[in-house]
Image (tube, grey):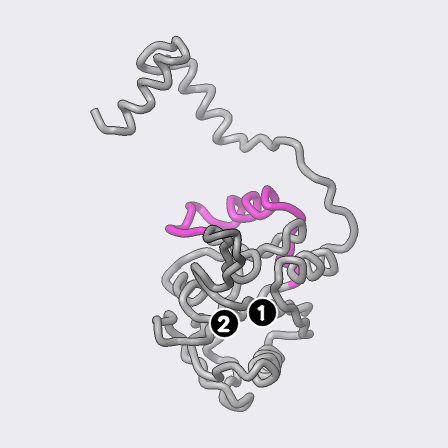
Amino acid sequence: MTTRDDILMRIRQANRRAVEPSADERATVRERLSSHPRGPLPTVQGELVPRFRERCLAMQSTVDQVGSLDQVPAAVARYLYDQRLPLAGACWPEFADLHWREAGLSLEPRPASGDDKTAVTGSFCAIAETGTLMLLSGENEHATSSLLPETHVAVVSAWRIVRTMEDAWDLLRRERSALPRQVNFVSGPSRTADIEMTLVMGAHGPFRVHVLIVTD
């Protein structure tokens, strides 16, 4: 018996259930998992892009908007220059063909390392309700790029902004046959107030998150 089995057995015994679940119980669980029923949801009204921008700002992300993907390098450069941030770092391979050098940047298509101060990633989708980015890990979607650098620039298509987290999971189920190894949710810069209720930025990840919404 594994430790998990022991814990589950104790829970069942405390609830006066048989040690092993019956066939009917297993069938009920399988049905619920396959149907993905929803509980009560908040009402998220209005246009999704303005709502997403509003919630991003509330979560202390910064936000910019461009008309097309080829405008991303100039927008990233403008942000980094304005904030006096490092102009070199990593980007996801999907952005390898963008004209970074013409914008004055040196962004290499590779996973971010502990020495990188800046990284640019894509995103699977974004959630208007909370201003949250949903990032999946994969061979070309490097999780380190949203976790290690001090500055995380995330690119999201306006057409990939959904209303709620439940909508984001539904989109993932429709488009992917299986879950990736990691699903990361990013809601603004990393922060904690665990020590004496003092807010500390960048405790477990980036000090700053800049979101670029591509409308085309």
Q: Please report the residue visible at 48 percent of the width from the left and 30 percent of the height from the top.
A: 33
User: Is 150 above or below relative to 187?
Assistant: below
User: Is 79 above or below relative to 139?
Assistant: below
Task: Determine which of the numbered discs, if any, sits on residue 151 in the image.
Answer: 2
Instruction: Give residue 141's position: percent from left, percent from top.
Output: 42, 63
The reply, left or right, for residue 52 in relation to residue 149 is: right
**What residue did someone put label 1 on?**
210
Is residue 70 magenta-colored?
no
Instruction: Give residue 56's position: percent from left, percent from top.
Output: 64, 60
Q: Please report the residue visible at 50 percent of the width from the left and 67 percent of the height from the top.
A: 207
In this orientation, does residue 12 appear? yes
Q: Are marks 1 and 2 in contact (CB under 8 Å)?
A: yes
Disc 2 residue type? Thr
**Quadrant (top left, top right, bottom left, bottom right) of the N terminus:** top left
Front residue of 22/193: it is: 193
**What is the residue that sits farthest to the right in this orientation?**
46
Element under label 1? strand
Mark 1 closeness class: few <14, some 14–19, many ≥20 residues within 10 Å: many
Labels in figure, total: 2
Disc 1 residue type? His
Magenta residues span 158-183
Front residue of 71/13: it is: 13
Task: Determine which of the numbered discs, if any, sits on residue 156 in the image.
Answer: none
**What is the residue that sits farthest to the front in this orientation?**
196
Mark 2 closeness class: few <14, some 14–19, many ≥20 residues within 10 Å: many
Element under label 2? strand
User: Is 146 above or below relative to 30?
Assistant: below
